[in-house]
Every structure is written in structure tokens, then in C-alpha cells.
Image (spheres, rainbow, N blue to C red):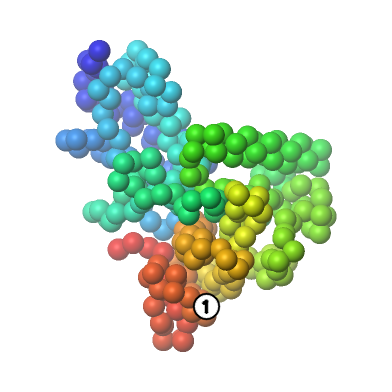
Amino acid sequence: MAVDWPREEIVAASRTHLLRPGAVTEGYAGVEVVEEAEAMLVVFRWRRDPNVYALEVDYPTVPESPMTGEPVDSAEEWAQDLEMHLAEELGTGLVHRGRRTLREGHVLLKSDDAPDAPAAGPPGFYIGSVPFDDPDLRQRPAGRRQFEYVRLEVSAFLRAGWNRLLGRGRYFTSITLSAESSGLSETEYWPTEPAMNDTIPRRLLGRGRLACWVQAYSINSDMLVGQAAASWEDDEHDVARIELLYTLPAIPSEVRYALARHVIVAAAEVGALRVVTSVDDPVLRRLGFRPSSTGDFAVQTTHE
């Protein structure tokens, strides 16, 4: 059965749900829902990223939820489930994994389940940020923080299992929080592998200069196999510097490429306008790093 809701009603309901304060998920700020001929364009900002992003959303042709596929009775109900669907997409790293196309002043993202979108990451690996600074968790009582840590660990384990079952190439997000948040000592808390040295990100964290920390996880070997970290280059936090980028021996170079790409996006999410490094690596040149006047390599996080 085809929908009989007027297009104007669909767009208006979508604006109600996607443009209100606190809509979709933490870090999302709706800018506009644009009615176009073939699809709606959901324009939004993401965290402190200097870019403006957009997603194309097809108009419904059947009265089914975009989240569950179950029947819905109205454009209002459809838009409510669209909000839930976008929350899942953004919460599982769409800004990191999506294909990007510059379009009229914003970055158009395409989900990794689209037929012509690239794979989310190298097969057999998850790439994700270490959420080392969570102010919300820091404010909770010690018992509540410990409970939240266990909840996040279980949730991450179940999500990884579900994605493996479905064959999804989702990015892995480490559940590593700060030692203060979890109630554990820093030595007990940080994950590591014998062959990996996390001295640099630990030192940057202790000095309050850690901008982002990214890890690569191998599904087959069930271990961390690479990492990258960036520091703040300036007090204004406009420039981030990649201090560390490596993978263990025999790990494909595409994993290092995914780590570097993730670092750029993670730095942009916390407000960096430019990323610089003294690391000379072919994967960085593929990502647009070019020699600068200071002798470093640099890339802008903004798409112009």
C-alpha cells in the first residue's frame, strides 16, 4: 500500500523531530530539512566539527518505519522513527565511516549500507576512538560510575556480537574511559598489548594535551593491532598534531590508513581546523597531507 501523506506533511513532521533542541543524539544540531525533488536533505552540525553535514533521506513510498520496517500510521510516526534511525547511524560512527561528497557548502554523507558506498573499514578490523574524557561520567558518584562502566562494557560486547552476526563492518568504539571516571587506577584501566607502546598518549593525557586517541582492533586475533594519537598544537585548540601512527608488523597498510582517517575526523569533532604532523607516511599523502612552510605535513579538516 502506497502512502497517501502529502509531501509537505512529511517534511513538516521531519522538521518537528529533527530540528528541535536535543534532537536525534548528543552532538547533533539540526540546521534545516530541505524539500528536494527526489529526497529530503537533512542538514546538521556535528559536535564541534567546523563542517556542515547533510544526509539524503528518501520520501516514504510505503507506510513503514525507516527504523524497524514495521507499519506506521502517519507522517508524524514515520518522522519519529526517522529520528531514531538517524540516532543509530550517528551513534555508530556515520560521520567517520560515511562516504563524503562536497555539495553547496556542506558535506554530503552516504551511509555504508548504500549500494555504491565504500566498506566501513578494512575487513576483519574495527577502528574507533578512545573516549578518554567524559565529563558526564566524571560528575556521577563512584558507585554509579562503576555501574556505568560495566554497562558500557556489556553493551559494547553485545553490539560487536550482533554486528558480527549480521556481517556488518561497523567501526569498533573502545569502551575505555578515563581512570577517574571508572574508579580504577590508570595502570589498571588502560588496555594495552605487549607489542604496543602507549607511552605517548598516556603522557599527552597527563599533560592535558591529548586531542584524540584512536585504536585498531583485529576481530580474528581479538587484540589491539594499531593506534594513533594527536595532541593540541596551540592553546586555542585550532590545530592538532599527529604524534603517533603505527600498526603491528604484518598488519595491512589499509588499517593504518583507516587509523589516520579516523584521527582527522576525531580531531575535527573536537574543533580542530587543521591537522599537522612530522610523520612522513604514504597513507597520509593519500589523505591530503602536503608539506607546509614549517617543514611539517598538514591537512585542513574543513571542506571548502
The residue drawn where x is 31% and y is 49% is: 108
Relative horizontal placement of residue 202, taking residue 55 as reference (left or right): right
Q: Quadrant of the C terminus?
A: bottom left
Expressed as whole percent of the image width and height from the top left, the position of residue 248 reads: 62, 66
User: Among all residues in the image, which is located at the extreme left?
Assistant: 37
Expressed as whole percent of the image width and height from the top left, the position of residue 159 reads: 59, 36
Would residue 225 be visible to someone looking at this image? yes
The residue drawn where x is 25% and y is 38% is: 34
Count of numbered badges drawn on the protein: 1
Q: How many other residues sit within 10 Å of disc 1, few (<14), some (14-19) or many (≥20)?
A: some
Q: Quadrant of residue 38?
A: top left
Relative horizontal placement of residue 145, taking residue 22 as reference (left or right): right
Query: Vertically, is 4 above or below 162?
Result: above
Task: Report helix, strand or loop for mark 1.
Answer: loop
Q: Quadrant of the N terminus?
A: top left
The residue drawn where x is 69% and y is 50% is: 177
The residue drawn where x is 44% and y is 46% is: 94
Expressed as whole percent of the image width and height from the top left, the position of residue 99 reads: 35, 51
Query: Vertically, is 111 above or below 278?
Result: above
Expressed as whole percent of the image width and height from the top left, the position of residue 155 reads: 64, 36
The one nearer the camera, 9 or 293, is 293
Relative horizontal placement of residue 63, taking residue 130 as reference (left or right): left
Query: Vertically, is 203 above or below 170?
Result: below
Relative horizontal placement of residue 272, taking residue 143 as reference (left or right): left
Q: Which residue is mark 1?
A: 279
Question: Which amino acid type is shown beneath numbered disc 1?
Answer: Val
Would residue 267 be visible to someone looking at this image? no
